[in-house]
Image: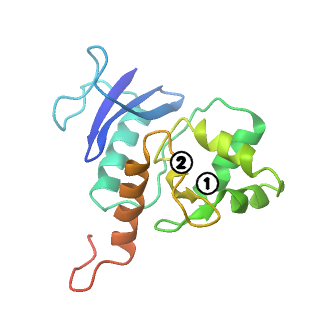
């Protein structure tokens, strides 16, 4: 089944079933009849999809920093290891591709980490946007660097708000 979440930076297509969320990716438009009308969910939605939609809504409202959605991902053992390491990056922080390669036990595999990042099937939920170049540059985000910048700024604002502004609750 597919459902859609209308985020501040574009439409996210969520797919999966009772076994878990299989994908979460940005799309230009909703495809097919299943999905969301405004901000409500279809009546019958597998639990993992419903939870992913709700948790994304909380994330964009500044009410969630970690996701606890049941996942059902396809990938190589190395990709899955990288994705697990990405989930360990704290909210509002970044790591380099090299940092992730070292954490996976393969210090020279930073390009392979980039490939695994690119194949991440659940954008935001597995926070591949938190991985940057070793020199601090924003690189390598298939959904567009402007979205990566927005997501990092969104998290940074919630962790360290501008002077005179209160953190969102």
Residue lying at the far left in this picture: please name it.
Answer: 38
Query: Residue at label 1?
Result: 86
Choose between 22 and 164: the one closer to the eye. 164
Q: Secondary structure at mark 1?
A: helix
Q: Secondary structure at mark 2?
A: loop
Position of residue 27 measured from the top left corner of the image (x, y, whole percent): 36, 29
Q: Which quarter of the rendering shows the C terminus?
A: bottom left
Q: Residue at x 35, y 47 (%)?
A: 56
Position of residue 123 measured from the top left corner of the image (x, y, whole percent): 48, 42
Query: Residue at label 2?
Result: 126
How many residues crowd mark 2 within 10 Å: few (<14), some (14–19), many (20+)?
Answer: many
- Horizontal side of 107 relative to 48 (left or right) equals right
33 up-or-down from 111: above or below: above
- Horizontal side of 44 relative to 1 (left or right) equals left
User: In the rendered structure, which disc, 1 or 2, sits on the residue that comes first in sequence?
Assistant: 1
168 up-or-down from 124: above or below: below
How far is mark 1 from mark 2, CA to CA?
6 Å
Residue lying at the far bottom in this picture: please name it.
Answer: 164
Q: Residue at x 34, y 70 (%)?
A: 158
Q: Residue at x 40, y 20 (%)?
A: 1
How many residues crowd mark 1 within 10 Å: few (<14), some (14–19), many (20+)?
Answer: many
28 up-or-down from 148: above or below: above
Q: Are marks 1 and 2 in contact (CB under 8 Å)?
A: yes
Position of residue 122 measured from the top left corner of the image (x, y, whole percent): 50, 39
Position of residue 26 measured from the top left corner of the image (x, y, whole percent): 39, 35
- On residue 14, the disc is none
Choose between 29 and 46: the one closer to the eye. 29
169 up-or-down from 68: above or below: below
Quadrant of the rendered image containing residue 31: top left
Q: Residue at x 42, y 43 (%)?
A: 144
């Amino acid at each position: 089944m597919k459902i859609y979440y209308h985020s501040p930076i574009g439409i996210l297509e969520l797919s999966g079933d009772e076994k878990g969320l299989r994908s979460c990716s940005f799309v230009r438009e909703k495809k097919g009849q299943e999905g969301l009308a405004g901000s409500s969910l279809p009546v019958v939605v597998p639990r993992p999809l419903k939870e992913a939609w709700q948790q994304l809504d909380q994330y964009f409202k500044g009410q969630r920093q970690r996701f606890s959605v049941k996942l059902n991902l396809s990938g190589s053992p190395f990709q899955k290891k990288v994705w697990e390491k990405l989930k360990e990056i704290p909210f509002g922080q970044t790591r380099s591709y090299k940092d992730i390669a070292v954490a996976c036990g393969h210090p020279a595999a930073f390009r392979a980490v980039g490939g695994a990042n690119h194949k991440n099937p659940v954008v935001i939920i597995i926070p591949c946007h938190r991985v940057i170049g070793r020199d601090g540059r924003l690189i390598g985000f298939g959904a567009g660097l402007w979205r990566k910048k927005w997501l990092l700024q969104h998290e940074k604002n919630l962790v360290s708000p501008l002077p005179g502004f209160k953190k969102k609750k």
